[in-house]
Amino acid sequence: MEHILFTLFLSITISTILNIFFKKFRISHIIGYIITGTLISYFFNFSSIDIHSLDLIAEFGIVFLMFTIGLEMSFDKIKKMKEILLLNGFLQVSISASLIYLVAFFVFSLSIEVSLIVSLAFSLSSTAIVLTYLKQSKDIHTPYGEKSTAILIFQDLAVIPILLLITFLTNDTLSISEVLTKTFVSALIIIVFMFTIGKKLISWLLKFASNTRIEELFLGSVLSIVIGTSLLAHEMGFTYSLGAFIAGMIISDTNFSVKVESDIASYKDLLLGAFFFSVGTKIDALYFLHNVHIILGIFMAIMLIKALVIYVIIRRKSDKSTAVKSALALCQVGEFSFAVFALASSSNLLSHEMTSFLILVSVLSMILTPFIVNNIYKLASYFVVEFYESDKITPIEVKNHVVICGFSILGRVIAHDLKERKIPFVIISDDLRHVILGRKLGYMAYFGHLDKLPVLESLKVDEASSIIITVSDTHIKRLICEAVLKFHAQANIILKIESLEEKSQLKDLNIKKFVHAHFEVGRLLVQEALVNLEKK
């Protein structure tokens, strides 16, 4: 017990110091956790301690992440995403696995079983890293974010048949038809139970806990639901995260989804930290140094194959920019590959040396991933010729200007009026057609998203006299306002709203002025009527 507490003390202290240092250089905190795990493992003999408990805690970091994703994936949203989830996901896993299998079998002369295991494991991407970034950056609501999320969800579901396949390869007593039948029956039992009796139990428990108005009881009920559904799925032969994802989907159709997500946010982040810490303990630094050239070569080849496959799949029905960003976001090897390699190794399908090699390739790609996703717009700009991209805006040289977000009809009216009054202003829009129109009219118009930090910095929002937001979507309004206020707490935001209900939804934000579109139009119409009346 003392050794474990000392190890936890060291890990928390070292990761905190590293991440404070990394924060100054805008390096992801994920790297700090991974490096901490490696340092503890080597310099403090952490390897001599049984880390099974840590691995279990780390796995529940993924569980809580998948639960929060489930909260955003209601049945209606799944129906809308069925093509990008099922078709794109299936194409990505099957084509990537096929190409990697051919390379493993014909180029490296691995056996059929080993080539199959390697190809399936390497076809998976990192749910923990990519989804964490997408949620924090709000990119999960962008076209590339939605497509990437859909593929990641399919990959998580694909882990189940992959693990079953490995079990089948090591079991001579069961036929493949028996394995598939058992899996299908188990899946059917879980889905039917969760969406009938389970749904009623979850709804009743949350409602009862909420009515008590005791926060710890509500949080306890949420934790019970997440852990309980995860254990149920695991007992039926599936991954913990599948049960949590289904539970999240059920709660997403209730009135408690927002509160549930906010209550478990800190726990999810803490458990995810433990996951990345456990990833660091799997790094064999000495083996890496002796085989660095081979590991780097394989690592680059895998990422290139996956990136090309994902680009081609997404490009079929999306623009080039979305395809490039999706390819960059998902080209790494994911954390579920560890489970695949561990099962194959324990079943003697992979040697210890081969397992160490494959884990190093996976970890190396995961270490590089935060750098890729945090700079995904900049990296995409090297492959996609666009008018402007978010972090490609040259910093403007004005002060006390007005920032107009959106350049539809209302935005154009505002820009024309400001020009007549000789008030300096800039326009930011995520619609390239509007940006081109603004440029033709001689305005300072830029293509990008005002909820991105590079855009806020380039447009000098902190030195602007006002930020006028003309977009219509309530969700996008919230994203923009939260980003602006986080960047400059005293920003003078003037927000157009369509209804009092919308104002109520946004009243928690520090917005200086709400302008009700219908009220203002109505007031002007009355004024015109009064003018005509006075003439008579």
Image (spheres, rainbow, N blue to C red):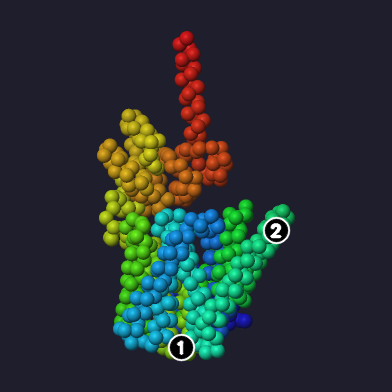
Graded by Cα atoms within 10 Å as few (under 14), some (14 to 19) or many (20 or more), the crowding at tag 1 reads: many
**Residue type, numbered disc 1:** Leu
**Between 197 and 478, the one nearer to me in the picture:** 197
Is 10 displayed left or right of 125 in the figure? right
x 42%, y 71%: residue: 93
Residue 471 on image: x %, y %: 43, 42
Q: Earlier in the sequence, mark 2 or mark 1?
A: 2
Is residue 265 in view from this perspective? no
> Label 2 to label 1, Cα distance in Å?
47 Å
In the picture, the disc for residue 349 is 1
x 28%, y 37%: residue: 441
Query: Farthest residue toward the front?
Result: 177
Q: Is residue 116 above or below residue 332?
A: below
Are the residues tagged 2 and 1 within 8 Å (C-beta)? no
**Residue type, numbered disc 2:** Trp
Residue 433 on image: x %, y %: 32, 44
Residue assigned mark 2: 204
Is residue 50 in view from this perspective? yes
In the picture, the disc for residue 285 is none
